[in-house]
Image (cartoon, rainbow, N blue to C red):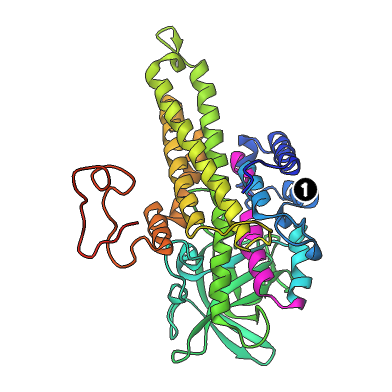
Amino acid sequence: MDAAFTEEQHEIRRTLRELLLKRCGPDGVKAAVRTPPGYDQELWRELAGRLGLPGLALPEAYGGVGCSPTELALACEETGRAVLPSPLIATAALAAPLILALGSARQREGLLPALATGELTGTLVVPGGQLATALALTGPNDGGWAGGGRAGGIQARPADDGWRLYGEAGQVLAGHTAEVLVVAAHTGGYARSRTLLFLVRAATADGRRDGVPGVPCLLRTRQTALDETRAQARLELREVPAELLGEGDGDEAAVTAALAATGVVAAAALAAEAVGTADAALTRTVGYVKEREQFGRPIGSFQAVQHRLSDLYVRLQAARSAAYYAAWAAGSNGSGGAETDGAAEPGAAALALAQALETLRTVAAEAVQLHGGIGFTWEHEAQLYFKRAAGDELLLGPVHRLRARAAEEAGLFAGGAVRAGAGGGPGRNGPAAVRAPEAVDV
């Protein structure tokens, strides 16, 4: 593994940072989230058309840039630094990888070029708010997360001209504006129930509401969320026409594997985004304590404040390293199509996401406190970081479940409990190793 970034990767970061500094300040973010789409559509078209952000990790054959998940993670770090409201994660890290992995040649050629250029946006629709479980980040994605085979979740039944979907799903990222919906639904009835993915092409259907494309029998309602910059929607499907993602009758094992692989890429991108947000919060806080005076001197000159900021900096750098490694690992296991010389470690993406979310939560909380009374007001910029931290953990966490799932994938608990103190302390260097029955060394 080469830990150094290439000049091209540095250029992606510099160009995106300069553009967002000019076009996406805190006031611009607050104005954008209050529009019907929930983001600045003109800025999105520039990011997609000029910089090709949605197609960074897509092959050139489908209109993408042909880069790896590392480039996508670097871009997400910059969008996180600006707390940019956009459909980037939903399109580039959720919908596009699934279409690339499972779609037929016709579906890939018809959708991926438009997704890569931002002409279309997409998202993954998972019922029950089980996005993290569906992506195998907080639990096994064996199909139970999609609802029961007889009732609940979203049901699919064959029709003369394709399929029909019936059910509901909440907390769908960018679900109120996405033109391409990748919907997880049950088919086969109760006896032969299996979870497959279906395509709903909202962009080609008739019907509009507030300028947002819609399809017959599909009601999309933007939900009130703690983090307004991460727009979510509730979808109600009533016999909505759809087509199976892929060819043949569908393969549930392939769907499960594709969702897990997509979860690796998405977790790396979200971890990098959280790191960027935490970095912005820390930078803004450091600037504030240098100017804010108390007892005739800047509060940043007090040793207690310096120690707190130093601890945050160390946590931030550790989370950044973990996010970068997770992005590299996402490419090394074939998720991003990159050629590498090593194999990805199990659970690296989930661990990186857990560390990044925890770091963002800690940095955002300290930013609010160190800004004093003004930091506790909803109008202050520190609240953008605090809401992003709380909202992301509600959507993709909690952190302890991410870590538990990573431990399962790594086999840490296979055959018994882990020896206490492994890596130091009483378990290894102390007088005795504390063991549970049938414990194993790791």
Q: Amino acid at mark 1?
A: Leu
| Above or below, comparing residue 286 to residue 69 in the picture | above
Drawn side of residue 68 relative to residue 269, left or right? right
Q: Nearer the viewer, residue 80 or 310?
A: 310
Q: Nearer the viewer, residue 52 or 327?
A: 327
Q: Residue at x 53, y 49 (%)?
A: 271
Q: Is residue 184 magenta?
A: no
Label 1: which secondary element: loop
Q: Residue at x 70, y 71 (%)?
A: 207
* Residue 420 makes an appearance in the image: yes
Residue 315 location, quadrant: top left
Residue range in magenta is 79-105
Tell me where residue 351 appears, x and y as whole percent.
46, 52
Tell me where residue 272 appears, x and y as whole percent.
57, 46
Mark 1 surroundings: few (<14), some (14-19) or many (≥20) residues within 10 A? some
Q: Which quadrant, please, contains the C terminus?
A: bottom left
Drawn side of residue 259 relative to residue 407, left or right? right
Q: Residue at x 48, y 16 (%)?
A: 292
| Above or below, comparing residue 98 to residue 226 in the picture | below
Tell me where residue 106 appears, x and y as whole percent.
77, 77
Residue under label 1: 51
| Above or below, comparing residue 23 to residue 325 in the picture | above
Q: How many marks?
A: 1
Drawn side of residue 219 relative to residue 404, left or right? right
Tell me where residue 432 appears, x and y as whole percent.
19, 48
